[in-house]
Amino acid sequence: KAGVTQTPRYLIKTRGQQVTLSCSPISGHRSVSWYQQTPGQGLQFLFEYFSETQRNKGNFPGRFSGRQFSNSRSEMNVSTLELGDSALYLCASSPWLLTGNEQFFGPGTRLTVL
Amino acid sequence: DQQVKQNSPSLSVQEGRISILNCDYTNSMFDYFLWYKKYPAEGPTFLISISSIKDKNEDGRFTVFLNKSAKHLSLHIVPSQPGDSAVYFCALDDGQKLVFGQGTRLTINP
C-alpha cells in the first residue's frame, strides 16, 4: 500500500505571496490532518478534515485554510505569506477520525519564505 | 501555553544501555498517549501508544509508562541500538486533536 504523499517537497516563496500544498492520504483513509513543524515548537496542529468537512482547527490565523476532496486528497493554502511561515508542513492520514487512532505521516513540504 | 513538554532537547546514550525519554503534561483531559519517531527528511512514524486506563504498555524493546497522578509519560528503549538515533515526539490526544511535545533528539553512541 502506498504511503502518504505530499507535493511539492520543497518550496520557496516571497512575503505576500500565497501557496498551496497538496496531500494524498493512504488509500481508504478518510481523515487528513495538517501540522506545522518549526524548530523548538514541535508539531503544531493546523486542522483535520474528515469526509470533506473540517472537523477541528488549531490556533492559527485565518490565512491558513484547507479543504478535502471526495477522494480524500487534501490541500492546504496559506495566503499573504510571512517570514514566520517558514516551516515543515506535515500531512497525516488515518482510517477513521483522528482521535484514538494512529496517524500515518507524509514526508512533509519544506516551505521557505524570503 | 505549552500543554506538553519534553524538557530534554537532546539525549546521548551508549549502545546496549537503556534510553529513557520523558514527557510532562498539564491537562488531565488527555485520554490517549502516543510516541512517534522521526528521521531526517521523513515524516514521523508511530512507535507505541497507551490509553489513560493503563500505566504500562510494552512492545519489544519499547515500553511506555504513564503516571497520571504526576502527569508524566516516559518511553524506555532497551537495549538501545544505533538505528534508534532519531527525534522522538510524545503526542497526547485530547479527544479532538493530537498535541505534540517539542521533541527529544536521541543519539546512540557505539
Image: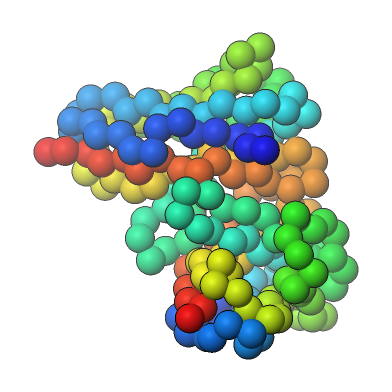
**Could you tell me if residue B57 is visible in this image?**
no
Residue B32, x across and y down, in percent: 68, 34
A37 relative to A57 in the view: left or right: left
Where residue B54 sits in the image (x, y, percent)? 65, 20
* As drawn, B26 above or below A86: above
Of the 4 image quadrants, the one containing the N terminus of chain B is top right
In the image, taking residue B36 as reference, residue A47 lies left or right, namely right
The colour scheme used here is rainbow
Q: Left of B16 or right of it: where is B23? A: right
Question: Could you say where residue A68 lies in the image, as x and y percent from the top left?
Answer: 78, 76
Give the number of callouts: 0
Instruction: Check the picture and name the quadrant holding the C terminus of chain B.
Output: top left
From what the image shows, is residue B85 above or below residue A82?
Answer: above
Most foreground residue, A31 or A29: A31
Which residue lies most toward the left here? B110
Q: Quadrant of residue B68?
A: top right
> Relative to A90, is B89 above or below?
above
Q: Quick one: which residue is furthest to the top in this view?
A: B69
Image location (x, y in percent) of residue A104: 58, 59
Q: Quadrant of residue B8?
A: top left
Q: Residue at x 48, y 77 (%)?
A: A112
Q: Is residue B72 visible?
A: yes
Q: Residue at x 51, y 78 (%)?
A: A113
Picture residue at 82% right of the left edge, 80% below the top: A70
Q: Is residue B96 above or below residue A87?
A: above
Q: Nearer the viewer, residue A41 or B25?
A: A41
| Apparent side of residue A52 relative to residue B9 in the rendered image (left or right) | right
